[in-house]
Image: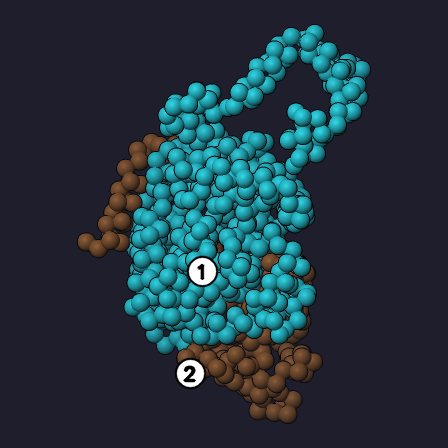
Amino acid sequence: MSAKANHSPHRLSEKAFFESSGSALKDPKLRRNFKRAMNGLMEKRRDIFPDASELEETRGRAGGIRRKTLAYFPELLEKLEANCESNGIRVHWAETTEQANQIVLEIARSTNTRLAVKGKSMVSEEMHLNAFLEKHDIEAIESDLGEYIIQVVNELPSHIIMPAIHKNLEEISQLFQEKVDPNRSSESAEEMTATARLILRQKFHDADMGISGVNFAVAETGTLCLVENEGNGRFSTTLPKVHVAVMGIEKVVESLQDLPPLLKMLTRSATGQPITTYFNMISGPRREGELDGPEEVHLVLLDHGRSKIYEDELLRETLLCIRCGACMNHCPVYTRIGGHAYNAVYPGPIGKILTPQIEGIESVGYLANASSLCGACVEVCPVKIPITDILLRLRRNRVRKKNARHWTDLNGGKSLMELMTWKGWKQVLSQPSLYRTQASLLSRIGNLLPAQIPVLRQWARSRSLPRFSKKPLHRLVEEAGIDHE
Amino acid sequence: MNESASSRSRILKRLHGIHSQSRFADHPEITEPQSPSWTTEEKISRLKSMMESVHSEIHCCSERDFDTVFRKVADEKSIASLLYAKNTQLGSRIHSLKQSTPEKMPELVNYDVTIETMKKRIFSIDASITETLGGIAETGSLILWPSRDEPRLMSLIPPIHLAVLQAEKIYNTFSEAIDEGRWAEKGMPTNALLISGPSKTADIEQTLVYGVHGPKQLVVFIIQ
Ligand code: SF4
């Protein structure tokens, strides 16, 4: 699956990002798919958190647990390693994704693995593991239904929880007909699910190795936890002879008692479920006398820039993330451009803060600019990551890093047009009479301006024009009898 | 030193290198959540409604009535073959049931050899029956604690999973289960599980479909 490797964020550029987000905005079908899906997810989350003060309390608790974990980060990693090893789990450390891939390859070689089944894992996406294994003649099959669908068409996940959310039923049905099984009817979601079940059960049966991610790793007991609904995670970690778990080092937690509040916040924030179908707690390979379970369990701890992120007190908060996806579900930018426009493994707000930090601020720092700083993500984040503060910091770091080679760089990369606009805006705002004239003018004729006039045309191509109120705000306020102060 | 070991020491060195003042800076106190304390009746009804809302089938019965209820379910679902674990208490009960009324019972398959020997066979069995360690009322979950006698794939491969839950072992919350069961002190089994319904997916246009990779049906007998 070499096409997948082409998605590597290393080859990305700001220009490509502008182009892809521009064309996403002009794709009505894509926008419909995302809008419908995100609205649904937001509604489900809202319904499961009916009590605002309770929600605040739970967020505080979940965030507190994650912050406590980071305070003892190195100690907990050492404890996790020791307890995993005493459970018989072999622990490997990788600073880079290349090293992590190499470790998985070596395990595959030493166990004669030809076919690996994979549970959903964002870290393995970060490693571009499938493409890597493929290059070394090892077949890696995604078994989460959403991941399976996008693997069939060589795409990146467009959402960290729902990887195939950009596709609607019709599109998926068509790809099942063309690429999965032309002989079976694949019209409804039920039929396609049944087809995938049949195909993938055979793969589970045949696979030599199972690869999974890790949602939480408990240091106290050396336990790897997986959160899922489908059962493919259980299959991948139970049936094949070898289980390899890959995890970002920040996924460690201290104790079993940390799990309930984090699990609760994860499933509720992600999909509005009180709990997922399966919560899988793995603490070692098959023991003497047991009849199933893998004979070998390996844990690959991937750094990929995380220990660097840890050095800074603000940026460190990025590592609190439990990958629930709520920030993207509520992000007005993500909802409009969709997950693929970012061309990065992690899209949406979390991607905008994480990707530049792990892939390099010089190469993908522009992602931090793709935000209006509205703060919707901060409001819903179950562990209270100050995403907007981190975005601002990353923007500042990026500007500082850039050489002032071009005059626009002195102005943070603003164009002449943008500069003039801000100048004019400042003039108007600092003179009350000018402001009033402009406001009453716009309230009278603003709605008559056709979207086709030159200054508006480009802007309006992918946006709907706002409606001007009949009366300016200050008039409304006066009429409502509210005093100036 | 191999590569993993040198990565390890570099990563840990960087993390340990952070000034402790920065690491331990003002952390908010973590408040204990208010834990519900329901009566057994309330716990049963909460667990039942939570699990039913995700397509599980719940039968409440007395210890004595279990045989009848079980046979009825097996019959209704036309279960022709049943995977069981003979060495558990439940297993021996199922076994004697088969001996006393063989004509009313499915064919029994005991899981007593390794998966490598069982693999082909296990994929063609209609249903399985397992015990549970307990339940969780708050989230509507079963706690499974697979063992040598009751291997972990029993609750995963057959399309119908029947599980037996003792009513008095339903905890209020997950947290209470961990505490009262003294999980950390006792040590974890190779694979502990919370199961809260039949396997499901919403990956195709957010349409909820049950029975994707794991069991298509989950039937719980709550013994009161
Ligand atoms: S940043 Fe917060 S909201 Fe976004 S995925 Fe991470 S935990 Fe969830």
The residue indicated by pointer 2 is B117
Number of numbered discs present? Answer: 2
The disc numbered 2 marks a residue on which chain? B
In the image, residue B221 above or below residue A67: below
Q: Quadrant of residue A479?
A: top right
Q: Which residue is drawn at 59% across and 66% down?
A: A178
Q: How far apart are marks 1 and 2 (CA)?
A: 34 Å
Q: Which chain gets the brown colouring?
A: B
In this picture, residue B102 sits left or right of residue A306: right
Mark 1: few/some/many CA within 10 Å (<14, 14-19, 20+): some
Pair 1/2: label in front:
1
Q: What residue type is labelled 2?
A: Thr
Q: Residue at x 30, y 33 (%)?
A: B19
Mark 2: few/some/many CA within 10 Å (<14, 14-19, 20+): few
Colour displayed for chain A in the image of the structure: cyan
Q: Which amino acid does label 1 sit on?
A: Met
The residue indicated by pointer 1 is A1
In this picture, residue A225 sits left or right of residue B46: left
**Residue A38 on image: x %, y %:** 64, 46
Residue in the foreground of this view, choosing between B14 and B218: B14
Query: In this rendering, does residue A21 appear at all?
Result: yes
Q: Residue at x 57, y 91 (%)?
A: B99
Q: Which residue lies furthest to the left in this view?
A: B1
In this picture, residue B82 sits left or right of residue A207: right
**Residue A201 on image: x %, y %:** 52, 72
Query: In this rendering, does residue B220 appear at all?
Result: no
Q: Which residue is drawn at 41% across and 77% down?
A: A291
